[in-house]
Amino acid sequence: MQTYRNTVDGLLSEPVSSYEIFNPANGQSLGFAPQSDEQEVERAVQAAMRAQKNWANQSDQERRDITLKIAQILEENSDYLAELITREQGKPLSGPGSRFEMQACVGWTQVPASLELPPETVYEDDERKDTLHRVPLGVVAAIAPWNWPLMIAIWQIIPAIRMGNTVVLKPSEYTPIATLEMVKLINDVLPAGVLNTVTGDGIIGSKLTHHPDISKIMFTGSESTGRQIIEASAKSLSPITLELGGNDAAIVMPGTNIKNIATDLFWGAFLNMGQTCACIKRLYVHEDDYETVMAELSAIASQMKIGDGMDESVLIGPLQNKMQLGKVQELVTDAKGAGCDIREFGEVPDQGYFMPITLVGNIKDGQRLVDEEQFGPALPIIRYSEVEDAIKSANRLEAGLGASLWTDEQAQASELATRLEAGTVWINQHGAIHPMVPFGGNKASGYGVEFGIEGLKAVTQGRVISIKK
Ligand code: NDP
C-alpha cells in the first residue's frame, strides 16, 4: 500500500510515522498518509519563510504565468485527482461531484491569475501624492476541511501565492491524500518552499497556527475550531479569514411555481450529501405550498441512486466520516422522537457511511435539526403563514453564511433580500458561488471574504507611499 508524502521545501518529505486512510463508501484501505510532527511543521514554516522574499520579488507577470501553469496542471490531472477525491471523500465522480470539484479548482486558479492589484492613488493635491500599494503578508497557514478538500485548499492557496505569499497547507486528517498529490503536482512549476504541506490532526493544525512566523491564517471549518484559531493568532498577530459554515435558510415565497424550482432546491440542500458550508439547511415554505414542495422534493429524491461514487450512475455518495454520520443520524433520531414526519429515500448499501436522503416535515424552529447545523442529507422543511415570520426565523440563529429567496416575483424578493442577515443572499439559486464574487459569512459564520479582488486584498497588506511635492 502506498504511503503518500508531504511536500516541504520542494521535496517529498520522508514520513516519521503514518496512518491509514479508508474509503468511506466501502471501508477499503486507500493507503497511508504521513503524520507530521512538530519538527516537520517547523521545517515547512522555515522553508516558506526562506522562499517568500524571492517569490515576492518576482514580477507580477511571472507569478501570473506560474498561476496559469498551475491551472493547466490541475486540468491535465483532473481525472486522476477526481478519482482520488471520490475514493477518499466519497462524493461521486458524476453530477455535482468530484469532476465538478476539479473544474472549480481550475476556474478558481485561472481567475486570480487574471486579476491584479496595481498601486492606487488615494489622494493628490498640489502638495502631496499618496499611493496605496498592496504587498504580500509573508507565510500563510491554510487549514482546509474534508468536505471539498481540493477546492477549498485552492481557494486558500492560489490567491496567497498569486500575491507573493508562501503557504503551509494542512489538509483535514480525514482527506489528506488527494491534497498531497495535488500539491506534489503543482510543485513542479513552483520554486521550492512556496507551497508546503503538513498533515495530521488538529494538534498539528494548532502547532501551525500558533507558529510566531505565520503572517496570515486562512481557515474553513467548524465554529469551535475557528474560535481556537482566533486565540492562536494572538501570538503572531496574524490576520485571519474565517469561514465557519452556516445554517442557511431558504424561503419559498407564497405562490411560487414549485415545479420550476424543485431541482435547484434539491441540489441546494443535498449537494455533496449536504456537507457543504453554504447548503440549504432549513427550508421555509408557505403553508399553502407545503404539500407541493414535499411531493416535488420526494419525487426527485426517489430517483437518486445512492452508492459508491465510482459508479457513474450514482449521484449521492456516503458521508465522509463516522463522526459526521453519527451527528446527522442523532439529529434525525431527535426529530423522530418529537413526532416529525420523516421521509427517507434511496436504497442504502450495507457497508460505508451511507444514509438515506431524508426530508423532515412537521418540524419547527427550536428543534435540534433546525437550530443545529446538520451538515448532511437531512433537510427540515418548516411551514410558515406570514412572510415576515419566515424572515424572522431565517435571522434568528447566530449563523449567517448564506440565505435564499425563491419566487416568481424578483422585484419583491430584491427588497426582502436586504433584510436577510447573511454574507450572501441568493434569489432563485443557493450556494451559487463565483470566483469573481466575494464570499464570506456574517455573524458567527466568520469574517473576511474570499474570491475576486476582495479575496486578493485579503492576502495582502496595504503600504502607503506618501510624497511631498
Ligand atoms: P474542524 O473545524 O475540526 O476541522 C477543520 C480543519 O481544522 C481540519 O483541517 C482540522 O484538522 C483543523 N483543526 C482542528 N482543530 C484545530 C486546531 N485547534 N487548530 C488548527 N486547526 C485545527 O471540523 P470537523 O472536521 O471536526 O467537523 C466538525 C463540524 O464542522 C462539522 O460537523 C461541520 O458542521 C463543520 N464543518 C464545516 C465546514 C465548512 O465548510 N465550513 C467544513 C468541515 C466541517 P483535522 O481534520 O485533522 O482534525
Image: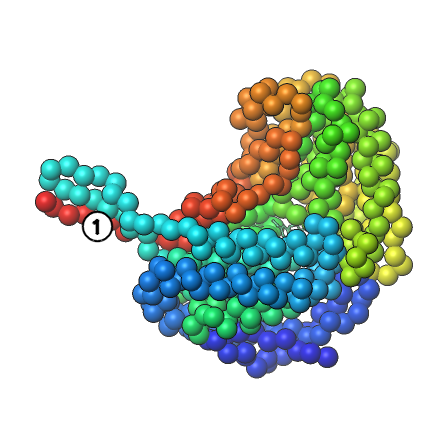
Seen at 65% across and 73% down, the residue is 33
Please give left or right for residue 327 compared with residue 465 in the image: right
Disc 1 marks which amino acid?
Ile
Please give left or right for residue 306 compared with residue 30 in the image.
right
In the rendered image, which quarter contains the N terminus?
bottom right
> What's the residue at 33%, 55% (across, down)?
135
- Seen at 74% across and 30% down, the residue is 260
Q: From the Cβ of disc 1, is ligand 1 less than 8 Å away?
A: no
Q: Where residue 362 sits: x, y (%)?
A: 82, 29
Report x, y in % for residue 119: 28, 49
Tell me residue 76's x, y (percent).
Answer: 59, 65
Q: Position of residue 202 (x, y in %)?
A: 59, 62
Q: Residues within 10 Å of mark 1 (few under 14, many from 20)?
A: few
Tag 1 secondary structure: strand
- Above or below 159: residue 127: above
Per the image, the residue denoted by label 1 is 465
Q: Could you say which is closer to the camera, residue 127 or residue 244?
A: 127
Residue 416 appears in view: no
Q: How is the image coloured?
A: rainbow
Residue at the extreme top of the image, as rendered: 386
Q: How many marks?
A: 1
Where's ligand 1: which quadrant?
A: bottom right
**Looking at the image, residue 394 lies above or below residue 35:** above
Image quarter hosting the C terminus? top left
Q: Is residue 306 left or right of residue 67?
A: right
The image quadrant of residue 56 is bottom left
Name above or below for residue 361 compared with residue 385. Answer: below
Depth order, front residue of 419/329? 419
Determine the residue positioned at 68% across, 57% down: 98
| Residue nearest the observer in this picture, 404 or 262 | 262
